[in-house]
Amino acid sequence: MIRKLFYLFVWFYGMTAPCPAQQNAPRPFGPVPSENQMRWQEMEYYAFLHFSINTFTDQEWGSGGDDVRIFNPDSLDCRQWARVCKGAGMKGIILTVKHHSGFCLWPSKYTEYSVKNTAWKNGKGDIVRELADACKEYGLKLGIYLSPWDRNYAGYGRPEYITYFRNQLRELLTHYGDIFEIWFDGANGGSGYYGGANETRKIDPKTYYDWKNTYQLIRSLQPKIVIWNDGGDRGDLRWVGTEAGNVGETNWSLLNDTGEVTWPMLHYGLENGNAWVPGEVNTSIRPGWFYHTYEDSKVKNLPQLMDLYYNSSGRNATLLLNFPIDRHGLIHPNDSLAALQLARAVKDAFSVNLAAGARATASNVRGNAKAFAPDKATDGQKDSYWATDDGVTQASITLDFGKPTTFNRVMAQEYIRLGQRVRTFRVEALTDGQWKELAMATTIGYKRMLLFPTVTATQLRLTITDAKACPLISNLAVYYAPLILTPPLISRNRSGEINILEEGGGSDIYYTLDGTPPTGRSPKYSGPFPTDGRVLVQAVAFDPSSGKSSAVSREEFDISHSKWKIIGTDDQHAGNTIDGNPNSAWHQGAEKKTPTGEKKMPIDLELDLGEMVNLSGFRYLPDQDWRHTGLIAVYQLFVSSDGRRWQMADDGEFPNINNNPLWQIRKFSPVQARYIKLRALRNTRGNDDAGYAELDVITE
Ligand code: FUL
């Protein structure tokens, strides 16, 4: 009996007593991620797909009034979408099942404005179904973008729309299997078709959608979902304040539960926030979100995509990269090629971890326990980590490679399940017996990558210089990423001179003007050269030491600006609008108080082209400054042959210019003219500031 009791005791103790490591395990510090957020964070990289009725009108936003019959992709293939995303190394796909136009890519039973009334598959098709099936086949997760703003629905702005919105959510969250993320865009209320009312409707995005109950519904239907919401209630994830493809180098996965969310909070997180709200970097592989043929040559090149990767995934955020679906219903080959090149380059850079064979030591180990030893940061296990004693917030971990080792990238990861802790850190290399600093940085979080010039060293040291609590490092990795040459930057100034710049220095540039791709036998660039009229410039950088060449860059210029004059102002900065430099801008209007500054909207910018030309469109680039001021949202474009009698050639809106302030290209029926006038009717802030980086024309 006594013996039995003894065994029972031993068994009971064995079941309940903490092992030494657990006994000393660090406690969570501050907010920590939920299981859903953790699962999402580990996805790291996934796709956005933008496709809607406005794909067929060449617009970034549909007005809600376009005839459904124009939606007719001839070769739509969701398996191709999934194949490309899988090949690109992505883990999921988020589709715009309903964008602001209100057009539904699934046959919702609550509206007629959907695929069911189109010629595509005789109205019998369901794109969400096809994508859900394709995702399953390719092992990808499915996410949904459902625009809260609906420019088609007659009752938008009234309470009845909330019922409609929730009915659609119910359809989407019950019929298509597991949904990993739902995306509620912040663009809300404004002009629209609204069942034929064609008016402007304003709503308060904080209260109108009754997010609290909407979230409850979502979570009850999809308990494993994460909610992205910009503009309404705080969701599980946050926008990083830009669509340009980067988050702050300092990036805390924290925000406050309540209260105002400012731009710096979005971009850098909030060091002492009381809620876990990690950042997601959303950006497009092309300038726009939707497909436009004229952007076929504007797909981001490999160095740009690599930067994007480092500035999102490498800065404690996930990367949500958009492919616009084209009018055939496919991802365009230029886009898939670029994404595959990125996947290959990421593989080339990160497949050999030089830390794996290194001996790791540390200045402090929690309780001197094996469970928290520095080799836990190099063992390739995501759930083990090097930890220091409580109260030790400065410590270093050293990797000894045992031989001279060449590298240029370091990756560090915190064990974020117990909170984000590291404020600042430094990386050094031991070369010729001397420690040399490679980089100083702020915040690590889930994953942080550091880039520095190639170095050959026998040891590497990462020193945490400040942390909120004892640091927990689950991964320290070292890589040697091959050189990728940046394609040259081509510009043309006001007098027609072409400039070609090569960023890194040290490479030769070759160019062509005859439409053929440049090679080492093409003319070698030796300095700016004059051009006149329309010209296509293509250039390539070549590095003689490595024998590598860059991708080809390509710029098409219309007639030169040498005879152009801005009329009606003597402000010397007005010329910035036609100087060919996207980084110089000019503003007029009451906000900026320029010499002509008392102007109120509508505000005109008048241009004398110096001769009669056959105009077929114009291009407007808003001020590129990050403060996003003076972005013209609604415009009219007038032309004239004498500068006195004007005729309107075009009018409309520049959709999404606030979040994505890129070149706005407008074509119209050809007309002979010498003068053009861009009239700003409204800017994105509703004040009287009209700003311009560039104004250009398109001739026949
Ligand atoms: C923006 C929208 O207005 C764009 O059209 C796009 O969907 C982008 C992802 O979000 O704010």
Image: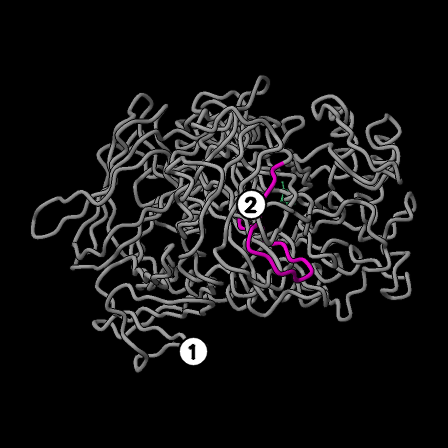
The residue singled out by tag 2 in the image is 282
Decide if residue 492 is on the left or right side of residue 434.
right
The answer to which of 220 and 648 lies nearer the viewer is 648
Let me know if residue 405 appears in the view.
yes
Let me know if residue 3 appears in the view.
no
Question: Relative to 416, does residue 245 appear above or below in the rendering?
Answer: below
Residue sitting at x 62%, y 32%: 602
> What's the mark number on residue 514?
1
Q: In this picture, which residue range is highlighted in magenta?
A: 660-680
Local crowd size for mark 2, using a 10 Å CA cut-off: few (<14), some (14–19), many (≥20): many
Q: Quadrant of residue 230?
A: top right
Decide if residue 688 is on the left or right side of residue 365.
right
Callout 1: helix, strand or loop? Answer: loop
Decide if residue 163 is on the left or right side of residue 183.
right
Q: Position of residue 103 (x, y in %)?
A: 81, 49
Question: Relative to 605, does residue 688 appear above or below in the rendering?
Answer: above
Q: CA distance from mark 1 to mark 2?
A: 37 Å
Name, please, the residue furthest toward the left: 433
Question: Relative to 115, does residue 681 appear above or below in the rendering?
Answer: above
User: What's the coloring here?
Assistant: one colour
Whether disc 2's CB lies below 8 Å from ligand 1 is answered yes
Residue sitting at x 33%, y 50%: 477
